[in-house]
Amino acid sequence: MNSLLGLFWPIFLVLGVCRGRLVTTPQGPLIRIEGQPVSLPCSVTDYEGPSEQDFDWLLLADDANLNPVQIVSTFDTLYTDAGLKERVSGGDIRIERLGDNKVELRIKEINMTDNGVYRCTTPSTDTQVVGEYFADVRVKVIPDSLVLEPRAPAAIVPEGGAVRLFCNATWNHTQGTYLSVTWSARKGLSTLEDLVTYGPDGEVQVMDAVSQRYASGGLRLDLQHRGSYGLVLSGAVPADQGVYVCTVREWAKEPGGGGWYKLQQKRMDFGHVSVTPTAQSLNVSVTGSTKLTTGETLHLSCRVQADDFSSLGLEVTWLSEGSHVLAHMDRNGISSVDSTPKNAVMRRVGAGLFKLELPAVETSHAGRYSCHLRAWMRNAAKGWYQVAEKTSAPVEVTVTHLETSFSVAFAALATPRLPGDPTELECRVTNVSHLRLFSRFAISWHHRPAAAHPVTAAPGNIMVGSLDYNGALKPGPRHRRRLDAGLVTMTHEEPLTFKLRLLHTGESDVGEYMCSVSTWSPNKSGQWEAGVDHQTPPFKVGFTTKGPSLSVVARRVREATTSGATFEMSCQVMAENLRGPSYSVLVHSQAEVGGTLRRLVSLSPDAVMRVEDWSEPGRQDAVTLLRTGPNEFSFRMQGVQVSDRGFYSCEVSAWTKQPGESDWSKVVHGTSNKVQIHYEHKGPSFSVAISSDTTSLYPWETAKMECAMSVSGTLPNPDDDTVYEVRWFLSRLRGGDSPVLLASMDRHGVVRKTPRNGTSDVSLERVGPRAVTLSIHSTQDTDTGEYHCQTTPWMRSQTTGAWSQAPALTSTRVFLNVKFALWASMRLPLLYGVCAAAIMGVVSLLLGLICTRCCCRSSAYTPRPRTKLMELEMD
């Protein structure tokens, strides 16, 4: 301890000697403007004596030969020089005490002669003269050069216009001063509120009341020219009117990081700015023809008058009877028909001029029509707000009715000679009079089938299709598919001609045809209503020659007498009254007569072969269908198996294609006789048996079961020519009907296992050509149940080498019981617990012995000698 005190005593002595009185004034130079008040603070710290200290202020001239000028003192009232006594006594210069150790020199209006260095001194009250007893600060006085020049704004601004205010300020910026401009407004009887401030550091401060408008560009500063500070309010609203004031402040940057110091400020009042509402100058009126006859067009004009259309968005709605909406146009110029009649047309033809056209008027269109206007204007946030809403005086419209008349002529432009030839019929509207404007014609075509055709089971006319007043096609139920495919077409050709075309006329198309033409006109509510309807007399359509016919004969070319042989069948087509047909062939098979038909292979009219319902593994290329002559086709099947036995037939369809068309049209079809594949198959017979080495065991032991297959028959080498698929199943309940698949082995020896949730596992092993063993490892009680296997034999043909599948065989069931042994399940946990308890006891004894030997030893108390303390005291 003595050595440490001896080391730090010199440091304490140096710190005590260096500490002394310290006088502080602002860091200069300070820039001040002539005629503005100035305050210079001065404080003293680290002094001795009384707490209240005295201060003297002196002014040091830049010329070292001149004596300092004594300004003012807190101790001596006679301290002031004679040249400053008048200013001090008049209160222009005074010293203000702010505390025991702090004062402030205040000059009410500083002038150019006050430029210089100001020194603050403190008389010594210390026992020793240590430290600094004065501090200096330079004050630079510059003349007042700030001049504001207002530019008078427009006293009256229309709503939606722009308020532009400019405040021009000039000053001597070479003196190191900067300007800030604040725009304020007084609205009504409220106080003056600041809007936005620019400077002095070039930043813009926006008040919360106008922050959203400033962000959207509705309020901005115009600073394009130096010394010109403009405020622009775009999209003016009546709430913007009031008195606007511009306040300019001159600032100086205080040295030493003191921030900005406001030297002076000047204010300029721009007077009152008024915003004229748009609604005062807005006017709406309706003109146009008011006496019409049915079928004529109603023309009405809505004229909007306003002082300025440039900033307005006009929304115009035509009304009937004061509330029924006819047409509407939004402020973007998009027109829509919100109600009936749907044929009303509205458009904008000029600035503030909107026209309504209602074609083909009816007597129901008579009434009172008016124009409703909503005027919109964009606000500062680029959104729209409504500024006015007005409705014109209504005008009375009268409509006189005249009936429409016309006639219809029916003609056949083309009639079929043979099936597949086209048919073209025409209905022409003539002698039209008093047709209402915007009225339209609709047509429907009807067909009455010939009595010899089965379609006559449905009595009456059949509608082929119709074209409504909009030209939309509506197909009939019997002709929908042909109309969708373009095989039947219905067209409307100007001026008033309608045509029906059957591209390929068939037997079902024979009969009588007629057309029905009707007029449709829009009513006042916008709905279309039917008028006059005329129907033509029936016209007969039939073939001039006998209809087409087709027959097919199938014969066996190559017989299949054994498994693996090749079967071949020929299909001969005989057709009459067909013009250049192309044939499609489809080969069917049936296991027995009257059974389900199976589609094997087909040949399209373009001679493209396609395999249909044939998915035999390894036999994808076993069937082929070829065209061997103009009217002959050959079907071939290789590697015939037992499952292929049955009856085979050909279905042939004749197709034609008209010139210039890409799609085939089906004319007629026929089905051949049946050819049978039948032979006696003396194949091997199979059986399967299951065995197990044990049926009762304990958990964690391994259970094994064997699935053995036996074969007897005509195979010369059954172990080489026969392979087996094996699947093992588990039924957890005796006699259960929902077994679970455990594992399987395909005929190639690939093993697949079902995911398990328990801890046990299964494996399959082929132990011979016809035996597969199932092993259950680490058995659990969840493995208890009935097990059985299922096998599927596969045989290889001696002649072709192709593999064929035999029916699957299922073995009997074997019950496996996994016992639950209490002692076997408890002995290991008990053994582990006893060992753990013994180990913890031994460890506890060892820890206690170590603690008593090492940590709890007693030691005698040795008193500290007092000589050390005495030595320290003497030091």
Image (spheres, helix red, strand yellow):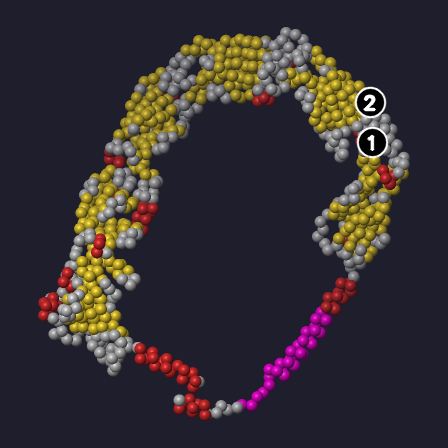
Q: Residue at x 81, y 45 (%)?
A: 789
Q: Residue at x 81, y 20 (%)?
A: 557
> Relative to the observer, which residue lies in front, 33 or 502?
33
**First in sequence: mark 1 vs mark 2:** 2
Q: Position of residue 37 (x, y in %)?
A: 18, 61
- Assign a secondary structure to mark 2: strand
Q: Residue at x 26, y 44 (%)?
A: 224
Pointer 2 residue = 558
> Please, what is the three-letter code of the amino acid marked with disc 1?
Thr
Residue extent of the magenta highlight: 833-861
Which image quarter: residue 279? top left
> Relative to the observer, which residue lies in front, 386 or 700?
700
- Assign a secondary structure to mark 1: loop
- As measured in the structure, the alpha-carbon distance from the residue carrying label 1 to the one carrying label 2 is 16 Å
Q: Position of residue 170 (x, y in %)?
A: 20, 50
Q: Residue at x 71, y 19 (%)?
A: 652
Q: Main secondary structure of the magenta part?
A: helix
Q: Residues within 10 Å of mark 2 (few under 14, many from 20)?
A: some
Q: Is residue 854 above or below residue 582?
A: below
- Is the C terminus in the top left, top right, bottom left or bottom right quadrant? bottom left
Pointer 1 residue = 800
Residue 449 visible, this orientation: no
Q: Is residue 466 above or below residue 193?
A: above
> Please, what is the three-letter code of the amino acid marked with disc 2?
Arg
Label of residue 341 in the image: none
Q: Is residue 855 above or below residue 554?
A: below
Asked whether disc 1 touches disc 2, contact meaning CB atoms under 8 Å apart, the reply is: no
> Relative to the observer, which residue lies in front, 409 or 671?
671
Q: Does residue 855 show up magenta in the picture?
A: yes
Q: Position of residue 659 (x, y in %)?
A: 60, 15
